[in-house]
Image (tube, helix red, strand yellow):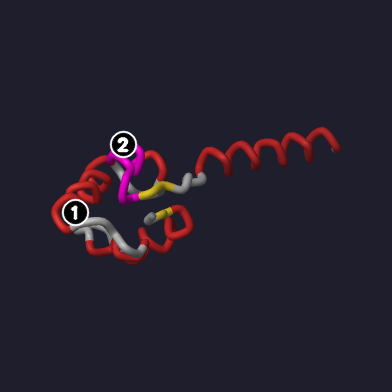
Amino acid sequence: MKTINTLAALAALVISSVTSAAPVNINTASATQIAEALNGIGMNKAQAIVDYRESYGLFSRADEIVFVRGIGDSTYEKNKSDILVK
């Protein structure tokens, strides 16, 4: 029984580390880095973030990511702890 519990805990740890996002600075990261770091952001949306900052300037707050077409409040909410703006 102890082995089963240990294996279950190990599996949960591995799964959570694979599915968790990594902090990323949306003012400096490439589209590839953004897509890899944020949940629900693929290459098209990541490129839209890069295009937005190139057109309108750097983001001053993480929540400004919702100004990017195709990125809504729910995407921001699930990633807000991993979005950096320095």
Amino acid type, label 2? Thr
Tell me residue 12's x, y (percent): 65, 42
Question: Residue at left 29%, top 59%?
Answer: 59
Question: Residue at left 48%, top 45%?
Answer: 22
Residue farthest left in this picture = 55
Q: Left or right: 77 with respect to 28?
A: right
Quick one: label 2 or label 1, which is nearer the N terminus?
2
Q: Left or right: 33 with respect to 21?
A: left
**Mark 2 and mark 1: span between their CA atoms?**
15 Å
Q: Which residue is mark 2?
A: 32
Identify the image quadrant of the N terminus.
top right
Tell me residue 75's x, y (percent): 36, 59
- Residue range of the region highlighted in magenta in the rendering: 26-35
Disc number for residue 52 = 1
The image shows a total of numbered marks equal to: 2
Q: Are marks 2 and 1 in contact (CB under 8 Å)?
A: no
Neighbour tally class for label 1: few under 14, some 14-19, many 20 plus, Cα within 10 Å:
some
The image quarter in which residue 6 lies: top right
- Image: 63 above or below 50: below
Neighbour tally class for label 2: few under 14, some 14-19, many 20 plus, Cα within 10 Å:
few
Question: Residue at left 24%, top 51%?
Answer: 49
Q: Left or right: 11 with respect to 36?
A: right
Instruction: Out of 84 and 86, give the one closest to the viewer.
Output: 86
- Image: 78 above or below 12: below
Identify the image quadrant of the C terminus.
bottom left
Tell me residue 80's x, y (percent): 43, 60
Instruction: Out of 68 and 19, give the one closest to the viewer.
Output: 68
Amino acid type, label 1? Tyr
